[in-house]
Image (cartoon, rainbow, N blue to C red):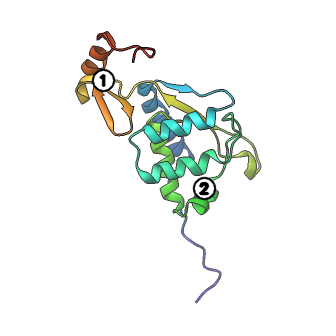
């Protein structure tokens, strides 16, 4: 076998095409109204939102692997996809796909890092929590409010409970 034979390129898309796809993912996330998470417990609040969301197991695994690389307040998160793939036991393409799902669902923001060295390329990830489940509530029927992981109320049921005369905390 010829050892000097050049390999075929692994990624056939151009940088402009990748940037267009990333910008489309960012635009898709805006319908969920993502809100940046701040504070000392930002990482933990974000992980709670990831757990309560209806994300796949693989997406949650990628999210947990990603958040380990930043500070507790949610800043300075910039691991490479190769590192995330190695830690999660997934392929690099799978990690990219699930990062894109997190961005499109409004849980994650990506800020491109610029520079001439390998460490300065890539993304700085920003932790977000989406404010709404969908931009068009009519497309999914009534808005769903999750109160507990296994309990779901419709918007009508939720607002009815708020108006009902319920027992106060000090009433027994």
The disc, 2 or 1, on the residue closer to the chain's N-terminal end is: 2
- Residue 140 pos. (x, y %): 25, 30
Q: Which residue is mark 1?
A: 136
Element carrying mark 2: helix
Q: Relative to 91, say whether 158 is above or below.
A: above
Q: In this view of the protein, which residue sits in the foreground, 172 or 136?
A: 172
For residue 126, side relative to residue 20 (left or right): right
Is residue 12 something one can see in this rendering?
no
Image quarter of residue 6: bottom right
For residue 42, side relative to residue 114 (left or right): left
Residue shown at 44% from the left, 17% from the top: 169
- Residue 115 pos. (x, y %): 75, 43
Q: In this view of the protein, which residue sits in the foreground, 52 or 127?
A: 52
Q: Specify the label residue 84 is tagged with.
A: 2
- Residue 141 pos. (x, y %): 22, 27
Element carrying mark 1: loop
- Classify 10 Å Cα crowding around label 2: few (below 14), some (14-19), many (20 and above): many
Is residue 67 something one can see in this rendering?
yes
Say which quadrant the N terminus sits in. bottom right
Residue shown at 51% from the left, 30% from the top: 129
Residue shown at 38% from the left, 39% from the top: 149
- Classify 10 Å Cα crowding around label 1: few (below 14), some (14-19), many (20 and above): few
Q: In this view of the protein, which residue sits in the foreground, 97 or 120?
A: 97
- Residue 145 pos. (x, y %): 34, 27
Q: Are marks 2 and 1 in contact (CB under 8 Å)?
A: no
| 3D distance between C-alphas at marks 2 and 1 | 33 Å
Q: In this view of the protein, which residue sits in the foreground, 48 or 141?
A: 48
Q: Return the residue found at the far bottom.
A: 1
Image quarter of residue 105: top left
Image quarter of residue 126: top right
């Amino acid at each position: 076998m010829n050892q000097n034979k050049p390999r075929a390129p692994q990624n056939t898309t151009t940088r402009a095409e990748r940037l267009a796809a990333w910008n489309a993912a960012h635009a898709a996330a805006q319908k969920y109204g993502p809100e940046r998470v701040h504070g000392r417990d930002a990482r933990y609040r974000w992980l709670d939102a990831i757990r309560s969301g209806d994300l796949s197991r693989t997406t949650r695994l990628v999210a947990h692997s990603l958040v380990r690389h930043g500070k507790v307040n949610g800043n300075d998160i910039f691991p490479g996809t190769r590192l995330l793939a190695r830690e999660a036991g997934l392929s690099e393409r799978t990690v990219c796909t699930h990062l894109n799902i997190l961005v499109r669902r409004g849980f994650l923001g990506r800020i491109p890092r610029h520079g001439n060295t390998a460490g300065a390329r890539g993304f700085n990830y920003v932790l977000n929590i989406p404010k709404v489940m969908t931009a068009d509530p009519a497309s999914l029927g009534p808005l769903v409010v999750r109160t507990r992981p296994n309990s779901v109320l419709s918007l009508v049921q939720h607002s009815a409970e708020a108006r009902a005369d319920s027992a106060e905390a000090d009433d027994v």
